[in-house]
Image (spheres, grey):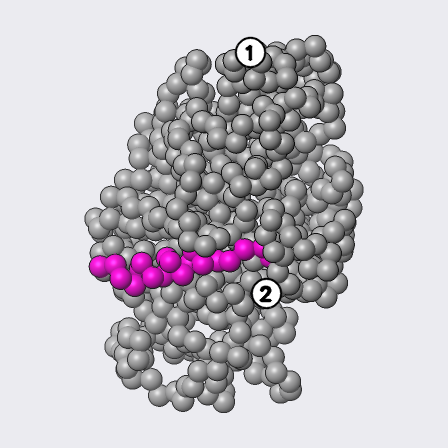
Amino acid sequence: MAPVTRRQFLKTAMLVSASGVWAKHFATASTLSWHERRDLFPEGVASGDPNSNSVLLWTRRAPEGPPQPSHLMLEVAEDQDFHRVVATQSVPISAEADWTCRVLVGGLKPARVYWYRFTDSDGNGSRIGRTRTAPDDHDPRPVRFAFVSCQNANVGAQNAYRRMIYEDDRAPEAEKLGFVLHLGDFIYELVWYPEDRKTYYARQVRDIVRYPNGEKIQDFHIPTTVDDYRAIYKAYLHDPELQDARAHFPFVPMWDNHEYSWLGWQGFQNFGGKNIPAQTRKVAANQAFFEYQPARLIKPSGPSLATFGAPKVVDAPITKFDEHGLGQEPNNLAAIGSLRGHRSLRWGKHLDLIITDERSYRSEDPFARHEADGLDDKDFQLFTAQEVIEILDGGRDFNNGKPPQTIRVGEKEIPNFRKDEPPQSYLGAEQKAWFLEQLRNSKATWKIWGSTTGTLEERVDPQNLPDGLAAKKWPGEGYGIIPIADVSNAFLEKGEIYDFVREHGITGFATVAGDLHSFWAGFSAKSLPPKKFEPVGLAFVTGSISAPGQTPTSWLIVPLGTLHIHSFITHMGVRIPRPLELGASPVYRPLAVE
């Protein structure tokens, strides 16, 4: 990265809507009176999205009655005792931003550890946080980072973070983690109260939050306002393991579905099998993410460095879609455009991390539509024939623009309701063009796609089952696929990306993903044998931090004695059947590239 001037830095701070602080050339001892009061900063501190000369810092000073402070003093130092302070700045806080602050500190040295803290006018201070900057673009040192996803404090413990901190504290400097990539489901907006449900997949339900507004659906509660979304973030950040991890490592966070809504897409929520316009809730979810996650996010709502500036939207019907499946209703476009999350991060010579948003621009999930119910098979509840998945995914572009009029599996046949509709998309046209351009222009050794959903198909081979093991013969033409709503089943879009990688000679391509609550490793390939198999890279999926894992939940929901065997092999790689566990959470393993 070329040297950044102070003027350029302040423009960057404006772009990501953070207060800007420029470090001094010479360090001096702190002159502030600081005494730690964690009770006044109950959500702790955090840092995020570091580059080689700057990093975002975050805290929240809880209100305790009038008069409320309007500013905090931030200090950044080269040592934990703050004898070598390189930046001191007054930063604003206000009720409009729920008393949070986002500060971009620039003028820092590459590949350096820094400590930071916040202090109010009475000397009450936050805990001390630790962060680090990225190496410069030509630095050849190896990159080490952890990638995580899916933490559900309502039903699990976050103690994987404790192990992460423990190992990092004892690692040699060259083996310490540079950052933690969080691939979404930082919160689970769907919450059970213990009086409504005692257990979930044999886990005790914990009483972590009560939404000030909220809506109850069946036996769970969901947020409906920005105050509700703020409440769930605060509840999660009161977890000591999570709070300590954010104080110890810089995070690079991206949302998945639960930061907004479980089955949400664009400005829709989906409950009871119905798409429900919820543009106001999408904006509320984006606002809370912006306020509680230190990330280089872009909002179009104005130049305010301290507040989100939510656009005015209403929950209006969304009935018109463009050729990529993007709803054109103005409130929908305003809601999903209120915050841009996709972005890239450079870490030394070896890594370009390219992070995508796979919920805001995605088209409707064709596998969840009621028109497909006629193909349901009680004897094969988890699987759908691969040819059906490919037809529904491809829409009018299936079979080179010659989709079938009907879809048949065994003796069941339904009209092809997708034959005149566009192919499924997770990225949307604009983001996909940006993503491919990032891949093509990268000069790093490794171009790693930070995908919030899995890219490896959950493919099984029931056609090879011995006679008599299942209630009947598998009706599909070949393999079966578990139709999870993720990139793996967007065959045309995924194939377009992998073709681009191959055709442009892009090397060092890999994907890291979350969402599946289980550990996977395999190859990035457009198709699998017996079709032409041309891997263009590697693919990994991480298990969950604390959300129930795939194998134990399948034991609880799938009847014993049926076809649905609980250990199966994917045809993209090897699924780790028993990840190492520490209590309720899988032990993380960092990824190193060089």
Q: CA distance from mark 2 to mark 1?
A: 52 Å
Residue type at mark 1 is: Asp
Query: Would you identify the image quadrant in which residue 187 lies?
Result: bottom right
The residue sitting at 47% across, 25% down in the picture is 495
Residue under pointer 1: 467
**Part of the protein shown in magenta:** 154-172
Mark 2 and mark 1 lie on one chain; the one further toward the N terminus is 2
| Picture layout, residue 80 above or below residue 501 | below
| Picture layout, residue 363 above or below residue 301 | above
Q: Secondary structure at mark 1?
A: loop
For this rendering, which residue is in front, 302 or 156?
156
Residue under pointer 2: 235
Disc number for residue 182: none
Residue type at mark 2 is: Ala
Q: Is residue 158 magenta?
A: yes
Q: In this rendering, would 209 be left or right of 457?
A: right
Q: Residues within 10 Å of mark 2 (few under 14, many from 20)?
A: some
Expressed as whole percent of the image width and height from the top left, the position of residue 77 reads 32, 75
The residue sitting at 34% across, 61% down in the picture is 166
Judge whether residue 34 can be spotted in this image. Answer: yes
Judge whether residue 443 can be spotted in this image. Answer: no
Q: Secondary structure at mark 2?
A: helix
Expressed as whole percent of the image width and height from the top left, the position of residue 13 reads 45, 63
The residue sitting at 52% across, 31% down in the picture is 566
Instruction: Count every numbered label the image shows and give the total.
Output: 2
Q: In this rendering, would 29 be left or right of 153?
A: left
Query: Would you identify the image quadrant in which residue 173 lies?
Result: bottom left
| Picture layout, residue 555 above or below residue 200 | above
Q: In this rendering, would 3 be left or right of 575?
A: left
Query: Would you identify the image quadrant in which residue 351 lies?
Result: top left
Expressed as whole percent of the image width and height from the top left, the position of residue 193 reads 69, 59
